[in-house]
Amino acid sequence: MGPRDVAAGLIDLLLPDSCGGCGQAGPSWCGVCAGQFGVPYEMALPGGPVVVAVGRYRGPLRTALLGFKERGRRDLGRPLATLLAAAAASAVPRGGPIWLVPAPSRPAAARARGGDHVLRLCRLLAARLAADGSEVVLAPALRLARRARDSVGLDAGQRAANLAGRLRVRPAGLPPAGTAVLLVDDVVTTGATLRACRKALAGNGIRADSALVLCDATGRPGP
């Protein structure tokens, strides 16, 4: 690969010429894809926080998330954060600061992706909420031990067992007790991750009764 090929690759990375949702030529997030989302909806998660989801794990939302998460399409972070910001209004009470706690990624997965994608998304979400006038604090208070496995293909019991004893708390990153804490993740499938995050925070005196996710992959009946 010559210098021109490298330069062309960098231009494609920095200036994508297709929509991350439908693949059509044009901006990274086209008006058609942006207009496909209805009202964010709430879902019950037994033993976990109340979850507000932007939409189902399908179509342009799924494609855009995978592009951002797995394929280096960082240009999709802002439109995805915009969707989360619109949903956040129904996920947290008004008044006072909002403490965003991202669900942690496995260290190996974060390295392969060039960083923790949920943390990156939370930074963009915090900036968007702050621009809208909210007081927001990013609190990366949780981390996963190296022994945690990839959860793809695991059922609910296996996912819970995979996380048992492997979710660590960073004391310096903990929100103050009594504050409005919002857990943030990209996808909810069985709810094992959000339950484990909530339990880990509760063990340190922090209540996390609300969660915000981009995609609902639970398979439950819904919109």
Image (cartoon, rainbow, N blue to C red):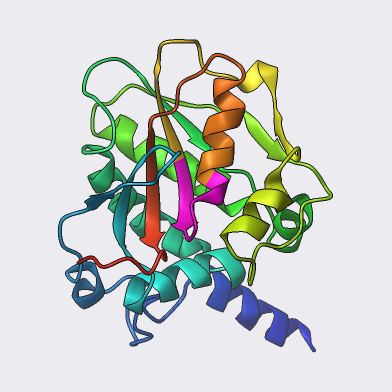
The residue lying furthest to the top in this view is 177
**Looking at the image, which is closer to me, 118 or 220?**
220
For residue 181, above or below residue 3? above
Q: Position of residue 163 (x, y in %)?
A: 69, 46
Q: Position of residue 207 (x, y in %)?
A: 45, 21
The quadrant of the rendering that contains the C terminus is bottom left
* Residue at 54% in and 78% down: 12
Q: Is residue 83 magenta?
A: no
Which contiguous range is marked in magenta? 184-193
Q: Position of residue 110 (x, y in %)?
A: 70, 54
Q: Is residue 188 magenta?
A: yes
Q: Position of residue 118 (x, y in %)?
A: 54, 49
* Residue at 79% in and 87% down: 2
| Left or right position of 82 against 151 | left
**Looking at the image, which is closer to me, 108 or 44?**
44
**Looking at the image, which is closer to me, 157 or 174?**
157
The quadrant of the rendering that contains the N terminus is bottom right
Does residue 27 appear in this view?
no
* Residue at 43% in and 76% down: 63
For residue 23, above or below residue 221? below
Does residue 10 appear in this view?
yes
| Left or right position of 65 against 4 | left
The residue lying furthest to the right in this view is 147
For residue 193, above or below residue 111? above
* Residue at 32% in and 81% down: 26
Q: Quadrant of residue 59?
A: bottom left
For residue 93, above or below residue 44? above
Q: Quadrant of residue 108?
A: bottom right
| Left or right position of 223 against 111 | left
